Image (cartoon, rainbow, N blue to C red):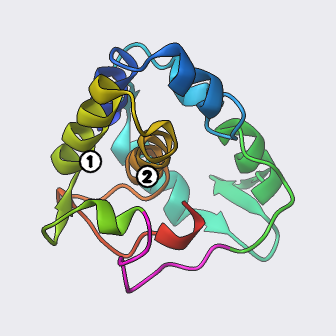
Amino acid sequence: MHRCESKYIVEVNNVLKDTHRKRIQATPFRWCLEVDNALEINYPLLREVLRSWVPQGEYIRVGQHLVGLSVYDVCICLGLSMVGKCVEFDVDVSVVVGSLFEKKPITLRDIINKIKNLVVSDDDVDNACRLYLLLCFTVFYFPRTSRTVTNMPFKVL
């Protein structure tokens, strides 16, 4: 078992104010606010499940058996809505969230530091919450072995 990068979510959750929590609770990422310990993920098991995934039938193969696991099941487990618009990844990060950073590439630590600065000053709740969602995207939905955050859906944020 390995600890995923959820420790960053825990770190940020400890500094958020009520105004930020209230705003985030109105999003599909409200469950992230409840993460209070770094999550342990069995990456070899996860990798094996992904290898046995059969998208045409939405199931995984376990030995001789087929176990149904639809996209909707995954959405429910992740706290996501089952309807919505497609999100394309952006090559250009010069939109609102990307413009908050002076340097490229952006790292997880850059996002956390920017959130902490915005929370302390309490003058930009919207951008602090956008950055929190970016952090959730990066940690839970699009994890990378690299510490840099690239090709994320910045326009959505």
- On the image, which quarter does residue 16 sit in? top left
Residue 84 located within the stretch drawn in magenta = no
Marker disc for residue 111: 1
Amino acid under disc 2: Leu
Spatial CA distance of label 1 from label 2 is 8 Å
Residue beneath the point at 31% across and 36% down: 118
Question: Sequence-wise, which precedes: disc 1 or disc 2?
Answer: 1
Q: Residue 84: x and y, percent? A: 82, 63
Label 1 close to label 2 by CB (< 8 Å): yes
Bounds of the magenta span?
87-96
Amino acid under disc 1: Ile
- On the image, which quarter does residue 100 sit in? bottom left
Is 48 in front, or is 92? 92
- On the image, which quarter does residue 122 sit in? top left
Toward the front, the furthest residue is 123
Q: Residue 138: x and y, percent? A: 39, 53
Element type at mark 2: helix
Tell me if mark 1 has few (under 14), some (14-19) or many (20+) residues whose alpha carbon lies within 10 angstroms of its own.
many
